[in-house]
Amino acid sequence: MNNTGLTRDKSAILLIYTGGTIGMKEDPTVQALRPFDFSQILEEVPELGKFAYRIDSYTFDPLIDSSDVEPAMWQELVRVIEDRYDSYDGFVVLHGTDTMAYSASVVSFMLEELTKPVIFTGSQLPIGTPRTDGKENLISSVEIAAAKDSEGHAIVPEVCICFDNVLMRGNRASKINSDNFRAFRSPNCPPLAEAGISIRYSDRHIRKPDSWDKRPLFHKELDTRVSILKLHPGITPQIVRTILCSTDTRAVIIETYGAGNAPSKEWFLDIVKEASSMGKILLNVTQCMAGSVNMDIYATGKCLKEAGVTNGYDSTTESSLGKLFYLLGVFKDNESVKAGLERDLRGEISK
Ligand code: ASP
């Protein structure tokens, strides 16, 4: 762990660098992007020195492109936060954008009753390039991670994604653009804050812990035996059966059409019932960017409900996946997992 040398003792922030574009810098000797030494962050982003915070950094080894993220990394991340929880007021996680929504989602479930901010950010352009969005994203994230109310409590004690001046709940965001600075959207949940001349917090949307005095629960057990079936016209019985009835999974997220609809063909429902009777947990999530599943509107949705499919409401696929990894890790019985899926645990669904 490195201390950047900022000593004025107000808030203390830990920057956790996992990899991704944000920490890259052009290496002129090989004319390629290379991760830079994060202990030198003040050299790259001298603006951070203007904050009266202590800013330390922790760098993952190895640094990864986020396409390579694995559950072990999420577990390490949670361990790093747990071990240092009392020493910092907030945590900023620098992460590649490609899978940031997955990581922010699962980590939101792994951290229960959080009392401090955990802000994920990254960038579309490396921090070492002139038009980088990385500096702005990093500076806003640090400011949000350090923000406290008049009682000294964190203003945003949640796992969030901060990108292009918008603070989103982590388990509500998706990456929607591969080359625009506005890379993330959270269509089913309003921003928790927006950074303009000042940072405007949307207090009524920010979740607070039941108690500020208790330490959070740090869950590290994950069960990743989950797969995703994306419906599309022309999908064959063989493909549906292979995914829904695989003996390697405990749960399948079915990405359905519109308000949670699926083909009404008999073969399709027969396979869903077969999977259900095999003990698979089947979760209905819509392919639409916004809106919710409602299995009571159309006959096709009703059939899924009768076949034992659980409602994913307005959750994103990324969030459903993280929630299932977490719930399956905690509970060995399906009934408890299904009960957990029905509940809003971390603001991930609107009910
Ligand atoms: N491929 C990179 C990653 O996700 C892209 C980025 O950092 O934005 O790690």
Image (cartoon, rainbow, N blue to C red):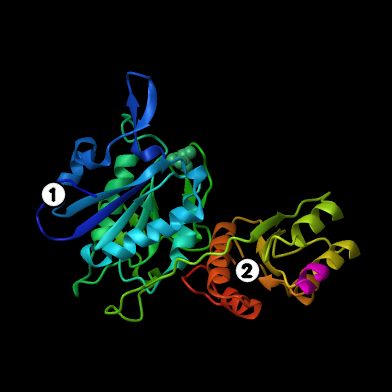
Q: Residue under circle 1?
A: 6
Name the foreground residue: 78 vs 50. 78
What x and y, as percent, mark residue 196? Answer: 30, 51
What x and y, as percent, mark residue 210? Answer: 36, 81
Majority secondary structure of magenta residues: helix
The range drawn in magenta is 273-278
What x and y, as percent, mark residue 261? Answer: 75, 64
Residue at figure coordinates x 15%, y 45% from the top left: 49
Q: Amino acid at mark 2?
A: Gly
Q: Quadrant of the C terminus?
A: bottom right
Q: Is residue 186 above or below residue 31?
A: below
Residue contact between numbered discs 1 and 2, judged by CB atoms under 8 Å: no
Q: Is residue 280 magenta?
A: no
Name the foreground residue: 216 vs 178. 216
Secondary structure state at the residue bearing disc 2: loop
* Residue at the far left in the pictured view: 8
Q: Is residue 45 above or below residue 314?
A: above
Q: Is residue 107 above or below residue 303?
A: above
Secondary structure state at the residue bearing disc 1: loop
Q: Residue under circle 2?
A: 312
